Amino acid sequence: MRKIEFFDTTLRDGEQSAGINLNTKEKLEIARQLEKYGVSIIEAGFPASSPGDFEAVKLIADTVKNSVVTGLARSIKSDIETSWEALKGGVQPHLHTFIATSPIHMQYKLNKTPEQVIEIAVESVKLAKKYFPLVQWSAEDATRSDKDFLVRIMNEVIKAGATTINIPDTVGYSTPIEYGALFKYLSENVTGIEKVKLSAHCHDDLGMAVANTLAAIENGATQVEGTINGIGERAGNAALEEVAVALHIRNNYYQADSGILLKETKRTSQLVSQLTGVVIQPNKAVVGKNAFAHESGIHQDGMLKNPETYEIITPDLIGDVATELVLGKHSGRHAFFSRAVEMGFQLSEEKLNAAFVAFKKLADRKKEISEEDLFVLLTDQQVKSGEVEVYELEELIIQYENNVPTSTITVKVPSGESIMETCAGSGAVEAIFNTLEKLVKGEVRILEYRVSSVSKGRDALGEAVVNLTYNGLTTTGRNASQDVLKASARAYINAINRQLVNVQIKEQAVVGQ
Ligand SMILES: [Zn+2]
């Protein structure tokens, strides 16, 4: 059976999409889960883009052992050299470099002739090969490029030492038959193509990313790129979990193996959704909340007689198993710890203890603690940075006077001092946000605000996600609490803190260079 390598770019193409900003700990947690999930390659970021990205890529390359770790670099000497510094600690250092090959990109974006583009591509691959044993070269906007120009440039970059050739549908323009034909054409016409890996990278602008990816596999692709839950620029990337399940369920057709541990699908998807704050649409294939729900009477009847009448994928396959045993107020440390391990968490003693304290606090107020509650609680402990928060919520009071809500908020600042402000609003949330804006002393614009319940029941945890700009920079914060007003205030403060810490990291790095 053919082996298809899975190249995950959740932390690069996914992370660069609107409203997502992960900190280093969160990125590392996702990378660890991707390693467990069995992806061959993790694209951890774009090291030359910022000191924060550099730091995260380096940490991931130094930590992950069972997946190859790569980073993106433009065809620029300093990008390639910076990437080497970030990636050299990896088990098999791998670089992903690219240049645009379509007429429109070459003329308007690069302002270069096709001959110049070939020269730059060859030089950058040669330079990369001085450092990296594995070099992937991408023809950006390949699907809108001239096929014979692609053959020419690929002949040259393979000669220069590229070990993988990627043919991205950067703008999500291609169709399955067209994209498959392109793979076939290049496989037949590029010299030396049989010695390198051939990769597909699809975007979902026309809703065809997964179909295009599968068409590429049928026509010679040996590597596929995508993200978990299909997150990414604009309409997103191909959803890797869908590709993996398709190869498994339709194995008789594709005759290909992904090497993905399908049982880790649900957990991987949940983790990415929680940490990025990007909700999964309920009807999404494979990982949507309703992906296995049968509502119609005829279907339910069939399912009872034989599940295979209407079910081609089982929840069990993707690790979506409901555990009967619920934890509650009287559950002890041991039951809690062993459940955390069962759920796949590897927390230090100290973090486990902190999580247990948080669990006890919640169990005092909530009758049954569900798997979803535990997941949020344990993940939060896992990614807690341990750094001093710039602002910390101490007290929140909401009062209504003549139907007008007023909020009074006290926050603690790093000097240890407590400061208080009061503001009204047309609703309680607006009152809170108005008060917080005064406290953080900067201009804040709310771009998106959402509260959703983590589990079922009236005492469920509410998770608030706030996407805002603070002094002109965009940032996202989140928090889960039974009290959604408190969760909203903390999510707002979390967003502000993240941005302040990020700015500090950038300033330190500039001084350090
Ligand atoms: Zn992309």
Image (spheres, helix red, strand yellow):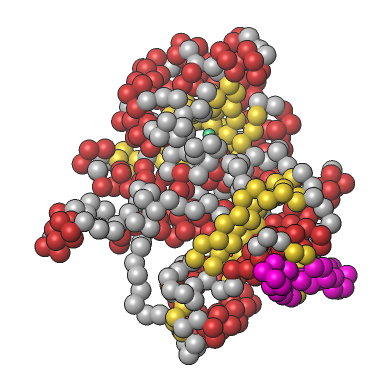
Residue 151 seen in this snapshot: yes
**Magenta segment range?**
395-422
Magenta stretch secondary structure, dominant: strand
264 in relation to 413, above or below: above
Task: Give the camera-side residue of 71 and 308.
Answer: 308
* Magenta-drawn stretch contains 268: no
Toward which corner of the image does residue 419 lie, by quadrant? Answer: bottom right
Q: Is residue 349 left or right of residue 36?
A: right
353 in relation to 501, above or below: below
Q: Residue at x 64, y 39 (%)?
A: 46
Task: Give the camera-side residue of 56 and 332.
Answer: 332
351 in relation to 435, above or below: below
Task: Give the camera-side residue of 127 and 396.
Answer: 396
Where the C terminus falls, by quadrant? top right
Q: Which residue lies most toward the bottom here?
A: 330
In percent of width and height, residue 235 lies at 49, 37
How many marks on residues?
A: 0
